[in-house]
Image (spheres, grey):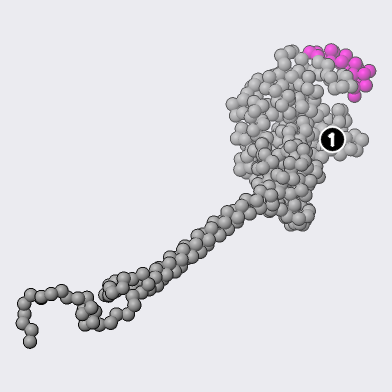
Amino acid sequence: MLRAGPVRGPVTLRSCERDAPQQSDPPPGGLRGVTPPTGPFLTRREELAARRAELREIARKRRRRGLFVLLAALVLLGVVFGGGAYLVGSTFFTDDFDGDGQGDAVVRVLDGDSTRQIGTMLARRGVVASPEAFTEAAAEEKKVLGIQPGYYQMRLQMSGESAVALMIDPSSRVGRLEIRGGTQLDDTRSPDGTVAPGVISLISQASCGRIDGQRRCVSPAELRQVMATADPASLGVPQWAVEDVARAEPNRKFEGLIVPGLYDVAPGTSAADVWKSLFAVSVAQLESSGLTADASHDGLATYQLLVLASLAEKEAITPDMGKVARVITNRLDINQRLELDSTVNYPLDLQALRTTAEARGTAGPYNSYQNTGLPPTPIAAPGKDAIAAALDPEAGPWTFFVRCQKDGTSCFATSLAEHQTNVGEAIRNGAF
């Protein structure tokens, strides 16, 4: 039995080694005789395994992130490429139809329309596929700059090139109406049998267009029916003319109210709408010429001034209109018959410088050889010069005139004897 107490003598390592349990060789790099740590501490092998697992996780995350970046790049590239393709397509490839088109389309070019505006209108109407189809084709054709306001007969689904070619072709223009000074409502004939179309015939011709494969026009009969029965004010007849128009013979109501000038008639519209469109333009021209509700001269009201202007238009060339208007007003002032051949021939629809004894002897409201005063309506369409002459006749005492030169020049007189001398000169000159 050992007694507790201080150890005496050295304790050798050998005895410790002998009494201690045997240890296996430490792992490479470890200290011999030192027991590796246990618990939360890892062995070198476990540490390496953990490190490899960590590296694999990092690599996996990098691959995932790289795939995401790649996908994002591909999406972005697709957007850029797609947008670029759209931009290129929209820039270099224009929507356009092929060929000359089909069907019918009547289109209108407005005053001041640019080539781009015309192209936009054509695309909206289905004539071309896009405004660019027209404008790009128009860029190669200088005649496009000469396209005038008005109506054009086109086709649907035309190529831009075909649309340009048709629009600059004069045959495509429809609805064009020109009224010249001195034109009557009715057709008139000359002594040689030549027939000159009147305002109503000209309107009917201008109204023609191809609609749904058929040529359609407003007939002269339809125009006359509206003139005879419609309320003048509802069609746009100026207020200062409504009362006189209502009193006029049905087939002469609108005489003189469609003044000379250029008009555009929309093909395919009704007779009433045609009249409305014409009055809208003509009344504006009348007013710009000075024929307004408050116009008056020599005791004549506005409508009577229009009648006077029509007489000057039919009886004189432009330089003499002021003097002829003065002759008429001078005769009106003394209640002398006007004795104008133009008024006698008017209801006969005859264009002639002279009258026959039979015609002068036929009673009627337009026979100024039998009646005093102005005829009940104008006898033709008066132009601006004739209207100006009626508003401000040239000052002078004349009460007679006769066409004494072949160019239409008239000779004026203040007495019957002087007038007879002028008539003799006219005969010698072959003026009539």
Residue 244 location, quadrant: top right
Q: Is residue 248 above or below residue 58?
A: above
- Give me the residue at 68% from left, 47% from top: 132
- Give me the residue at 74% from left, 49% from top: 160
Residue 268 within the magenta-colored segment of the rendering: no
Query: Could you say which is closer to the camera, residue 41 or residue 33?
Result: 33
Q: What percent of the width, then of the height, locates residue 212?
A: 74, 57
| Type of the residue with mark 1 | Leu
- Give me the residue at 22% from left, 75% from top: 13
4 vs 242, left or right, is: left
Q: What percent of the width, then of the height, locates residue 14?
A: 23, 78
Residue 390 location, quadrant: top right
36 vs 364, left or right, is: left
Task: Tell me if residue 274 can be seen.
Answer: no
Q: What percent of the width, then of the height, locates residue 352?
A: 86, 31
- Give me the residue at 50% from left, 60% from top: 69
Query: According to the image, label 1 marks what residue?
Result: 350
Q: Main secondary structure of the magenta part?
A: helix
Q: Secondary structure at mark 1?
A: loop
Q: What percent of the width, then of the height, locates residue 86?
A: 62, 53
What's drawn in magenta, residue-wise? 413-432
Q: Is residue 203 above or below residue 321?
A: below
Query: Could you say which is closer to the camera, residue 205 or residue 302?
Result: 205
Disc 1 packing (10 Å; few <14; some 14–19; many ≥20): many
Query: Could you say which is closer to the camera, residue 366 or residue 5?
Result: 5
| Quadrant of the image containing the N terminus | bottom left
Residue 429 within the magenta-colored segment of the rendering: yes
Task: Tell me if residue 114 can be seen.
Answer: yes
| Quadrant of the image containing the C terminus | top right
Q: Is residue 239 above or below residue 52?
A: above
